Amino acid sequence: MKKIRRTWITGVLYCILAISLSACGINSDNSDKSNASAQAKSNYPIKPILVVAPSGAGGGWDRTARTFVKGMADTKLVVQPMLVENKPGGGGAVFMAEYATKDTKNDYKLFTSSPPILINHLKRDGNSPFGYKDSTPLAQLTKDFGSIVVKSDSKYQDLSSLLDALRVNPSKITIAGGSAPGSMYHLVGILPAYKSGIDHKSIKYVSYDGTSEAMTALLGENADVIATDASSVTQFVKAGQVRVLAVASPERLGGELKDVPTMKELGIDAEFAIWRGIFGPKEMSPEALTFWNDKINKLTGSAEWKEVLESNGWEGDYKNSVDFSAFLQDQEQMIKELLVALDMAK
């Protein structure tokens, strides 16, 4: 009887042990599958990445996109191929309308932008229904400043002579820029006139899809003046093709523009910073966001990136995703106030 009882107990213990081992095996398998799934998610990126410049070649967005891609390759921070594509139209508004509706979850398509992503959404005429909140701000990379530029043989030798002519007949002078009416370069172009009490609404502004096209118009004498970012004109200054009348920076810039006065020096209380940054889709995955925060932070701290800044005449002003989003919120309010003052807000 005792032998039967011992046999029964032993059998029960074997069954319990077998069930326990089986359960452990199941849990282990599930854990392995869960880890494998997490591992697969964290393998981003697994295919080529496209960086869109919403303008023509040669402008600020294009140069930012290409130097960003080159920097990632040179530092080997991203092993997957990175390609640049130009998508001009409406000062970035055409691309943004497509991106905000068709690429909301596309982790493999990023884009470069600057103040127009705010201005296009806030201005009254030709405004875009989409703004920075229809994307994921990844990082601010650089800071530039607005500038007023003429051909080297222009009769306007300084900003004062240009403003005097605008005061007499504001519709006679053509100011060109690489963004839509009411957008960034338009604001840069009319800002000194507005601050000087000149009728800015009567100034003739012609828009082009990018700084390169605006510069071509100036050199081809299809425009009297262009408003653009300071870093984009240094090569033309060096070649003796253009003269910069003033920059909208808090203090003088260096390099080829070291002798150019600021607007404030000339008695015009005006500044216009042109930041540039990288954006992703509105519903970017946490894995992709973490990846880019890490890689861009490392890129901006590298020796290669510092060389890029110096060669382009850019000022580094890195902000990570969280700080960049907070900055954009403040910028949106500032630009809205400027557009209201210029009677250009929607």
Image: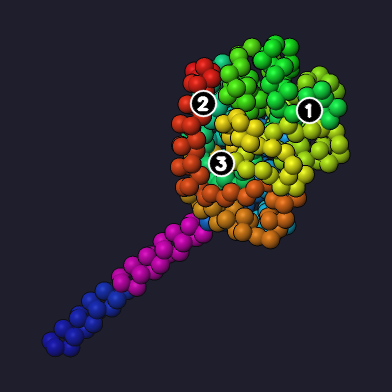
Q: Nearer the viewer, residue 321 or 334?
A: 334
Q: Nearer the viewer, mark 3 or mark 2?
A: 2
Q: Position of residue 236 (x, y in %)?
A: 82, 37
Q: Is residue 36 magenta?
A: yes
Q: Is residue 338 magenta?
A: no
Decide if residue 301 is on the left or right side of residue 260: left
Q: Earlier in the sequence, mark 1 or mark 3?
A: 1
Which amino acid is tagged 1?
Gln
Residue indicated by mark 2: 338
Which amino acid is tagged 3?
Gly
* Residue 152 vertical placement versus 143 (above, below): above
Cα distance in 3D space between marks 1 and 3: 43 Å
The quadrant where residue 188 appears: top right
Residue indicated by mark 1: 157
Q: Which residues are magenta?
A: 19-41
Q: Earlier in the sequence, mark 1 or mark 2?
A: 1
Quarter of the rendering occupied by the N terminus: bottom left
Decide if residue 271 is on the left or right side of residue 235: left
SS assignment at label 2? helix
